Each structure stands twice: as C-alpha cells, then as structure tokens.
C-alpha cells in the first residue's frame, strides 16, 4: 500500500522506537497489524507495529524510478 503524508509525523516503530516519518518515507506495516472495514479499507493500525525502512524523504527517489 502506498500513501502520502501531508505533514511529518512521529511514528512509534517496532524496532527503533520513535522515528520521524516524512512524506516519501518507506514504512512497512505487517498485514496482521491492519484493521479493515467491511469494504476492505484500512480503519486502523495496531500501535507500535510499523517498521521504518527509509525514515526520511529518501524513498521519493525509489518511487520515481
């Protein structure tokens, strides 16, 4: 799933604790941590379940390729 952030947020990650996540970051959220609606939209995410693969805006270059 890809999404864009309109502001920088602090994400409490599983492995690294609090990390500043900016637009363009690459964050992994395990499927088991997602809470779906009946329409299969994401309604929520379990706390402290994200893993920041690229925390800064460095992911923008990967998406552009």
Image: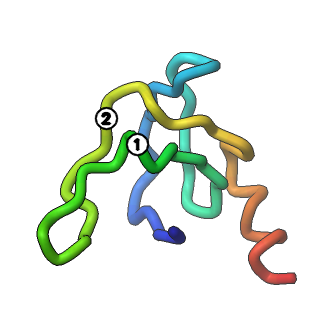
Residue 64, picture quadrant: bottom right
Please identify, in this view, whether the residue under mark 2 or under mark 1 is nearer the observer: 1
Question: Residue placed at 59% from the left, 49% from the top?
Answer: 27
Q: Which mark is residue 15?
A: none
Identify the element where label 1 is drawn: helix
Question: Residue placed at 53% from the left, 70% from the top?
Answer: 2
Label 1 crowd bin: few (<14), some (14–19), many (20+), radius 10 Å: few
Q: In the current view of this chain or complex, which residue is farthest to the bottom?
A: 65
Residue matched to label 2: 46
Label 2 crowd bin: few (<14), some (14–19), many (20+), radius 10 Å: few
Residue 53 x %, y %: 72, 43
Above or below — where is 51 with respect to 59? Answer: above
Identify the element where label 2 is drawn: loop
Relative depth, front residue between 57 and 2: 2
Q: Taking 56 as reference, is 38 left or right? A: left
Question: Residue placed at 41% from the left, 56% from the top?
Answer: 7
Relative depth, front residue between 49 and 26: 49
Residue 50 x %, y %: 50, 37
Q: Earlier in the sequence, mark 2 or mark 1?
A: 1
Q: How is the image coloured?
A: rainbow
Question: Residue placed at 55% from the left, 61% from the top?
Answer: 23
Residue matched to label 1: 32
Evaluate if marks 2 and 1 touch, with contact meaning CB atoms under 8 Å apart: yes
Q: Taking 40 as reference, is 38 left or right? A: left
Residue 59 x %, y %: 74, 61
Residue 44 x %, y %: 23, 49
Q: Mark 2 to mark 1: distance in Å?
A: 9 Å
């Amino acid at each position: 799933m890809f999404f864009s952030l309109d502001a920088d947020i602090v994400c409490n990650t599983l492995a690294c604790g609090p990390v500043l996540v900016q637009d363009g970051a690459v964050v992994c959220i395990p499927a088991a941590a997602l809470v779906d609606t009946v329409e299969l939209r994401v309604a929520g995410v379990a706390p402290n379940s994200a893993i920041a693969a690229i925390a800064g805006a460095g992911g923008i270059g990967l998406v552009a390729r």
